[in-house]
Image: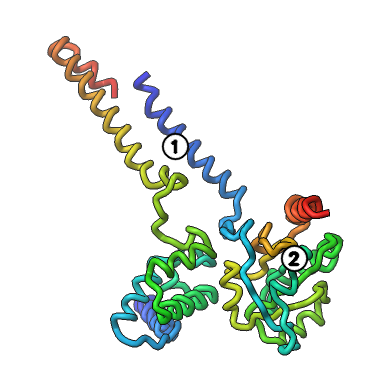
Amino acid sequence: MSRLLPLLAFLLLASLFGFGIWWNTQHDQHEIVSPLINQPAPDFQLPVLGDDARKVGKASLLGKPYLLNIFGSWCIECVHEHPMLMTDAKTLGIALVGYNYKDEPDAANAWIAEHGNPFDVIVADRDGRQALDFGVYGAPETFLIDAKGFIRYKHVGPLTPDVMTTELKPAVEALAKESP
Amino acid sequence: MRRLLALLVFALAIGACFAQAIQPLPFRDRAEEVRFQKLSAELRCPMCQNETLADSNAPIAHDLRRQIFDLMQAGKSDEEIKSYLVQRYSDFVLYQPPVKPGTWLLWFGPGVVLLAGAVVVALQVRRRSRNATNNNVATTADNEDDW
């Protein structure tokens, strides 16, 4: 028995190592689970992109669920994500709100003109200060906010077809069941 | 070798330039700057994940440093600033995670493992010393071969 002990200890360590590798393949190391899930969204009010006089915020968006997509013309992953917003996200049946993050309005407008505009409205947070209240730390990020203004779901990184079908769609359907 | 050394010096010089240009903040005095440096060194950048907010050059680290500075100017304590960040970015931003049921394994796990090791060693030592006194000299050699 005592001769087997070193082997057993080795196998224990090896399986721990294997578990660590498996865990890392299952989890995105860059994703911080937001403490704001199921919390009221921060009270924000931002100018509409290209029209500083018009403001859109939490108060004016209350009443219907919407998807808040953080993007920027400087953001490389956003280009990869954009086709998803142009097609699948539009079939979700909820409003799409663009959140232009730390961007120049001209660059943002040019980017939208080039890649298409899936959004019902785009708000601009030029210095990124408001985004801190959302716990944003990069782009793209996507929030699902319900009719009462609560954050129900957050995705860090580009929306992929997989994320769409396994996470976002079920979350939107769950919202629809709550308030028919 | 000399070229390598020159390259190293050059790289360090570039690094030093960046370090100074990273973000000049208008501190009121030296004490405030020290407090800011200490606080931002205890916080983790959410983007780059293994750098402190003090060290990171990521845009979000830049924004958070500015926010910490503004909160300091508004008279917030270190604890208030930390809880401001935890509310938005979770415990992840703290390099020293708080002691709570979810982190007990993290905090006390190593102690438990050490204790378990100590128990095993103590049992072994007791068993051996008992064997040694019972069987005297003849069998001790066999015992040593065991390991």
Residue B30 lies, in percent from the top left, at 29, 84
Residue name at image x 84 percent, y 65 percent = A90
Q: What residue is pinned by disc 2?
A: A67
Amino acid beneath label 2? Leu
Mark yes or no: residue A89 visible: yes
Mark yes or no: residue A165 visible: no
Residue name at image x 70 percent, y 83 percent = A47
- On the picture, is A38 further left or further right than A7? right
Residue name at image x 32 percent, y 41 percent = B111
Residue B50 lies, in percent from the top left, at 46, 63
Q: Is residue A17 above or below residue B131?
A: below
Tell me how many marks there are.
Answer: 2
Nearer the N terminus, badge 1 or badge 2?
1
Q: Residues within 10 Å of mark 2 (few under 14, many from 20)?
A: many
Q: What residue is pinned by disc 1?
A: A13
Q: Is residue A152 above or below residue B115?
A: below
Residue B12 lies, in percent from the top left, at 38, 79
Which quadrant is the N terminus of chain A positioned in? top left
Chain letter behind tag 2:
A
Quadrant in the picture for residue A65: bottom right
CA–CA distance between discs 1 and 2? 44 Å
Quadrant in the picture for residue B53: bottom left
Q: Residues within 10 Å of mark 1 (few under 14, many from 20)?
A: few
Residue B25 lies, in percent from the top left, at 42, 85
Quadrant in the picture for residue B14: bottom left
Chain letter behind tag 1:
A
Amino acid beneath label 1? Leu
Residue A169's tag is none
Helix, strand or loop at label 2? It is: strand
Q: Is residue A36 above or below residue B107?
A: below
Helix, strand or loop at label 1? It is: helix
